[in-house]
Amino acid sequence: MIENPVPWPNGARCAVALTFDIDSESPLHLEHRNRVPDLVATTSWMRYDEIAVPRILRLYRDLGLKQTFFYPAWCMKTYPHLVEQILADGHEIGHHGYIHENYNQLPREEQEAFFVRALETMVSITGQKPRGFRAPIYNFSRYTAEMLVRHGFEYDASLMTDDVPHLVDAAGGSFVEIPSHWSLDDWPQYVHATDFGYQMTIRSPDEACAVYMADFEAAYRYGGLWVGVWHPWVSGRPARLDGIARMVETMQARGNVWFARLDEIAAHVRKVTEEGSYQPRRIRLPYYEEGLPESEFPRL
């Protein structure tokens, strides 16, 4: 099924990462600006991160996991105590924009300004440059790949390009892409938020985890990659996080599963590529420099 599986460390059947995007109420400020002081109920829900992140960290300690958290830099600056807790436990923090901005709806100069401000803020708080990036809402733009190369990023985790990591070439260099999919995101399963225009039926944890585990079973069978994309204020609720705990325990009991941070996965892909023991798929971005011409759309 997967024609070019990565040779995972120690003969593992698949690689697994359980990532969280710690957006807090940054999207609310971005989309509603002056209305935010009146959106108290929605703000209170999104600030549930203050409860959820310590709970997630306790779970990861219990399970013996070191994982990757993606953080808008504004949220790091606003809630530095959560950043300290994450780093103290040996987890990775990746770039997730400044205030959850939508990169593919901004002019190039604004994208660069947000990206650099976030980068500078992260370095000032953590003392080190992040290795990886995930575009908010996966909204990677035509300029993002070149920007990641120019700023020396080792990997991206925004795209849905494959079932295993691969290389992305852009102007000036390349980086490792660590893809995931909406099927491993908690947003379609749980989010009911009228202020954002989402009114989906809320699934039970058993239903959500059945979707996640179907992808795991296929990854395990065919040598693939499984990257959960979750949010503390969504999946940090007790029943949902308990579902994640039971799911991880099932994976651990299966054996031959490599649990890793995304920077470790990217480094491994680079290593086996440079050694010549693996030849990853390569793509070049952007796919298009401009839209199709009018001649491709016949008119009556």
Image (tube, rainbow, N blue to C red):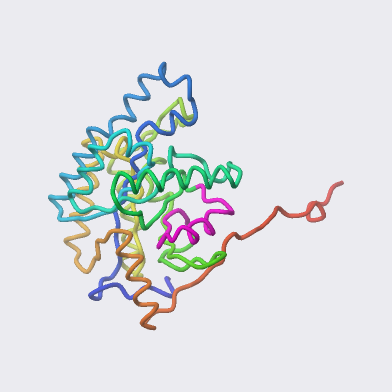
Find residue 105 and report its horizontal and vertical position in percent: 58, 42
Which residue lies most toward the bottom here? 276
Which residue lies most toward the top here? 38
The stretch in magenta equals 139-160
> Foreground residue, 213 or 256?
256
> Foreground residue, 253 or 271?
271
Q: Is residue 96 left or right of residue 63?
A: right
Q: Is residue 8 left or right of residue 108?
A: left
Residue in the picture at 30% in, 48% down: 209
Find residue 277 and report its horizontal and vertical position in percent: 36, 82
Find residue 106 and report its horizontal and vertical position in percent: 58, 42
Residue in the picture at 24% in, 39% down: 82
221 w.r.t. 96: above or below: below
Find residue 47 and report its horizontal and vertical position in percent: 31, 29
Q: Quadrant of residue 16?
A: bottom left
* Residue 294 inside the magenta-drawn segment: no
- Quarter of the figure with the N terminus: bottom left
> Foreground residue, 129 or 212?
129
